[in-house]
């Protein structure tokens, strides 16, 4: 997702050349701030999230199929979700297999809960994964027996 900030022209002459807001069709008042989006001008107050209707104004937003979304709704609606916590996958993530993706902080041993993506984790070169669960070395050996990874 790419969050974008719109530029807010501070050119009063530009406002005089633009007849009306592309959203509400009202004209722009003298010195009134407006936004340019995809070649159209809109009142700052008219620029809202397609999903929740919250005023975006000059806040970061994301666009999909020509529609603007606040970052919260864009993440909720369109980003893949972490298989552990269910929140949108942003930032550093761990792909366990083709079906399981997790936030780095959610990548934990299924038994003891130690964080497997932590730099100080002593699990060897890689965490041990079976089907859709990950384990630290100790619990992997208990679950699978000492010979299953050798």
Image: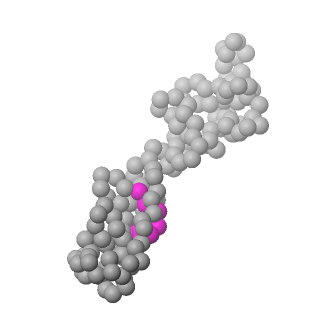
Q: Most extreme residue toward the bottom, as rendered?
A: 30
Viewer-proximal residue among 25 and 124: 25
Whether residue 18 can be seen here? yes
Q: Is residue 11 above or below residue 114?
A: below
Q: Is residue 68 left or right of residue 108?
A: left
Q: Which residues are magenta?
A: 52-62
Where's residue 148, x and y in %? 66, 14
Q: Is residue 122 magenta?
A: no
Q: Quadrant of residue 139?
A: top right
Question: Considering only vertical position in the picture, is 123 above or below 56?
Answer: above
State left or right for residue 36 relative to residue 17.
right
Q: Residue at x 66, y 28 (%)?
A: 127
- Residue drawn 52% across the image and 40% down it: 83
Q: Residue 95: x, y in percent? A: 54, 33
Main secondary-structure element of the magenta-colored stretch: loop
For this rendering, which residue is in front, 132 or 23?
23
Give the quadrant of residue 15. bottom left
Q: Is residue 86 above or below residue 45?
A: above
Q: Nearer the viewer, residue 86 or 37?
A: 37
């Amino acid at each position: 997702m790419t969050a974008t900030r719109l530029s807010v022209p501070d050119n009063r002459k530009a406002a005089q050349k633009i007849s009306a807001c592309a959203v509400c069709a009202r004209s722009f008042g003298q010195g009134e701030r407006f936004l340019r989006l995809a070649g159209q001008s809109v009142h700052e107050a008219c620029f809202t999230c397609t999903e929740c209707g919250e005023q975006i104004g000059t806040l970061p937003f994301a666009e999909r199929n020509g529609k603007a979304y606040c970052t919260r709704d864009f993440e909720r609606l369109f980003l893949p979700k972490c298989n552990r916590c269910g929140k949108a996958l942003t930032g550093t993530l761990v792909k366990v297999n083709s079906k399981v993706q997790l936030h780095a902080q959610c990548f934990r041993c299924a038994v003891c809960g130690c964080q497997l993506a932590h730099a100080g984790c002593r699990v060897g070169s890689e965490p041990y994964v079976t089907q859709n669960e990950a384990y630290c070395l100790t619990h992997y050996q208990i679950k699978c027996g000492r010979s299953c990874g050798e």
